Amino acid sequence: MLKRLNEALPGLVLVIIIYGILLQVTGVWLVDDKLRYSTGLWIGIGCALFMAIHMAISIEDAVCIGTEDGARKKTIASAMIRYVVVLAVLVVMCYFNLGMILPAFFGVLGLKFSAYAQPLFDRFHKKDDRPIDEISEKKRR
């Protein structure tokens, strides 16, 4: 399903989850309050996953709009929605003392890490060098 939105999205989501697991395994040994560390981290990872999926949907919608001005407005509005949602989640998290804010911030940074690590993981993924028309023709059969 994720691949229908964007070709790179499944890899992006996978790297975000791997990043979260690595931070969980290494960071839990460095803090006293392991539960608040873990909840903060996974709230941040959840925000990163939301941002990645929402970004893919927004790009698809902006491309389908057809006009450059409409696409620009859609892209800006979608980015603002993502920032407001993440800010609201972090504020609610702090207000209700649901987790540590620093691990949550590092979890959100999982999206950046994943985007920068994507070329490294693409090397392990077998690419199909055939033209798009040939690939889609084979899938139709």
Image (spheres, rainbow, N blue to C red):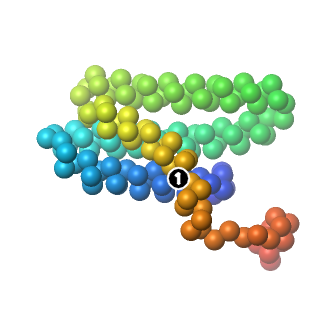
Q: Is residue 62 above or below residue 1?
A: above
- Which residue is located at x 27 percent, y 54 percent? 25
**Residue 67 is drawn in which quadrant?**
top right
Taking the image as shown, residue 69 lies to the left or right of residue 16, namely: right
Q: Is residue 27 above or below residue 80?
A: below
Residue situated in front as seen by the camera: 110 or 95: 110
x and y, in percent, of residue 110 in the image: 45, 44
- Which residue is located at x 66 percent, y 51 percent? 5
x and y, in percent, of residue 118 in the image: 56, 54
Badge 1: few (under 14), some or many (20 or more) residues near its Cα, within 10 Å?
some
Taking the image as shown, residue 134 lies to the left or right of residue 26, namely: right
Taking the image as shown, residue 92 lies to the left or right of residue 139, namely: left
Label 1 secondary element: helix
The number of callouts visible is: 1
State the quadrant of the C terminus: bottom right
Q: Is residue 115 above or below residue 129?
A: above
x and y, in percent, of residue 82 in the image: 54, 31
x and y, in percent, of residue 95 in the image: 28, 22
- Which residue is located at x 63 percent, y 44 percent? 56
**Residue 39 is drawn in which quadrant?**
top left
Is any part of residue 114 visible from this angle? Answer: yes
- Which residue is located at x 50 percent, y 24 percent? 84
State the quadrant of the N terminus: bottom right
| Mark 1 residue type | Ala
Q: Is residue 9 above or below residue 52?
A: below
Is any part of residue 10 visible from this angle? Answer: no
Q: Which residue was labeled with disc 1?
A: 117
